[in-house]
Amino acid sequence: MEYFTSIGFLVLGVILYSLIALNNRDFFHPSAVGAFIWFLTSSISLYPGFYDWSIQEYISVETTVSVAMAGVFFSVPAILLRVNFKEVLRARHSDARIEFGAIYYTFINFFSVLTLLAFFVRFEGQLGSPALFAIGQSIDIKNNVPDGIPILHYFDYITPIVALTLIYEWFFNDRVSRKRRIVIALYMSFVVISTVFYKVSRGEFLLICLGFVYLLYAKSVISGRRVFIKLFLWIFALLVVVVLLGVLRISEQSRVSGQFGEGVGIVFSQIYTYFSFNFQNLNALVVSETPHTYVWATWRFLLKFFYAGDFRQAFDIVDYELLFFNAKTFIYYFYHDLGIPGVILYSFLIGSFVELVYKVSVRDIRFVLVLAVIQKPIFFLFFGNYFFGEFIMVFGLLFTFAAVFTMRCRVRGNAFA
């Protein structure tokens, strides 16, 4: 039965991707990509032929239903609300001009300086010895990365978002000066070096690269250029670098690297465990029959600020973790609160948010920046709720919207504040 379910999920992912992408004339539609990756990763995760039976177990029927409902209801808004993305975007914005005025420059320059400050304060004692060079000193060299500094860690977190905002400026500012391009290039060099060598963060690197690819795609749609091959090459290069970072970061002795043996098996082991054990953690919650917490698990990122004690213990929020892997799918806490109805409700709301931003971006090109920033949450639904799972993620979204509203969009003589 599990084998048929695995194949069925893969087929359902292809169907939803095709339906959304073809209806919107957009092969890079965020909801289509999100639905496909969700069902692809769940399909592989449900396939028992890959299991290590010493630590994994069959996914329960209720977990399977929850995963299916999450993917379907995440996709529903994109299916119901259709638009010819390329035609409309090109028609409305072929002669669009984004104005980057004094408010924008003050805003982005101020936060750029804060991100630099946050980095140098955090890594003051390790500037001469980046964590990436500590290969072989521990099972996971991320253990050598110093913890974030309270308050400053918010600015550390938005570093890749600031980088994407500057890339957006480079792409869509027709009046950007040569001096400004040099400043942006220098900042991007800092971000890449700090992310890869000092933070060894695949997450931040993915946020930048996925956002960059989407901005490149949007720019090509507006200009009418065909960049499918270029985008494919960028995505392929991105995957290679991410896999390489994983191999360098995590020792061969780690259980993460041992699912499929040695050699090339280490690479496949890291990829497989990266998404499959998220579903195992979700399944552990489902089969445990933990009492529902109603709102406390999903909205803990806000509610915990109003509670002085041990929030998780007080409201019976349980985090099931498969030995070495503590990540969970984006629906984990939704199920924790309300079961399958919670999975349906919140998946639909997140899908509606993505579709709302998508529709607005067609009419106001400034919001393409928001789409670029949420590419990682869309691609990594299997890993966790990157939309509002923690307050720091909400801070990142608020920063992005604030950056958008510091710009002005003029199309054929009309201005949008």
Image: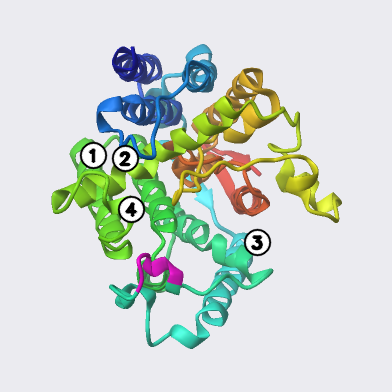
Residue 258 colored magenta? Answer: no
- Residue range of the region highlighted in magenta in the rendering: 138-143
Q: Secondary structure at mark 4?
A: helix
Q: Earlier in the sequence, mark 4 or mark 3?
A: 3
Q: Are marks 1 and 3 in contact (CB under 8 Å)?
A: no
Q: Earlier in the sequence, mark 4 or mark 2?
A: 2
| Amino acid bearing label 1 | Val
Q: Which mark is residue 220?
A: 2
| Amino acid bearing label 3 | Ile
Rendered location of residue 364, percent (x, y): 55, 36
Q: Which mark is residue 351?
A: none
- The residue carrying pointer 3 sits among few (fewer than 14), some (14 to 19) or many (20 or more) residues within 10 Å by Cα, namely few
Tell me the quadrant of the picture where the N terminus can be found: top left
Q: Residue at x 24, y 58 (%)?
A: 244
Q: Give the quadrant of residue 40.
A: top left
- Label 1 to label 3, Cα distance in Å? 33 Å
- Label 4 to label 2, Cα distance in Å? 42 Å
Q: In this rendering, would 248 be left or right of 408?
A: left
Q: Earlier in the sequence, mark 1 or mark 4?
A: 1
- Label 1 to label 2, Cα distance in Å? 7 Å
| Amino acid bearing label 2 | Ser
